[in-house]
Image (cartoon, rainbow, N blue to C red):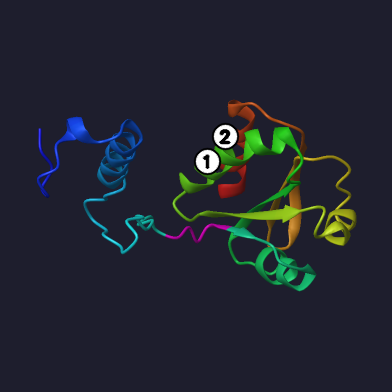
Amino acid sequence: MKLGNGTSLRLMPPIMLRSLLLRRLWSCSTRHPLVEVSGRRPLSVSAARRDVFTVQDEEDFRTRVLDSQNNVIVDFTAVWCPPCKILKPRLEAAVAATNGAVDLAVVDIDELGEVALDHDVQAVPTLMVVKKGQVTEKVVGLVDEDRLTALVEKAKM
């Protein structure tokens, strides 16, 4: 077999042959049918999620959670918390299924310890349902699917 420049594959040193094959495999696997970018790395084409947001500071919490016209589930979490990592995708999926009826506010207790203390958060994960500035329900710990679904349904009402 010959390459485009007339070089035979048999005459190539094995290391060069491996490098050539890896480059070809890489270039094939990184092409995206909808997005072509220089450097051959595809861009994400997913839509931005408006119903899930990370609280930045105490003022942001007041504005986007306590003063919100929408019902909000607040997820008090920490990056070092394994149960929080398990709960997060399930919670995001449950909130997304409400089609905008409920928002999800994520509060990192290491970044916003004062907000966590103001709401008596003593363990993570802690979920709170806030309706018109009032906490209507609070759940501590990793919850099963049934309890999570019931919490989101209560938040919708």
Asked whether disc 2 touches disc 1, contact meaning CB atoms under 8 Å apart, the reply is: yes
Determine the main secondary structure of the stretch shown in magenta: loop
Residue receiving disc 1: 94
Q: In this view, does 87 lie to the left or right of 38?
A: right
- Rendered residue at 32%/34% (across/down): 18
> How far apart in space, not on screen, are marks 2 and 1 (Cα)?
7 Å
Between tags 2 and 1, which lies in front? 1
Image: magenta residue range: 48-52
- Rendered residue at 56%/36% (across/down): 90
Around disc 1, counting alpha carbons within 10 Å, would you say few (fewer than 14), some (14 to 19), or many (20 or more)? Answer: some
Residue receiving disc 2: 149
Which residue is at the front of the view, 152 or 124? 124
Which residue is at the front of the view, 45 or 43? 43
Residue 120 seen = yes
Picture coordinates of residue 92 (x, y %)? 55, 45
- Rendered residue at 48%/58% (across/down): 49
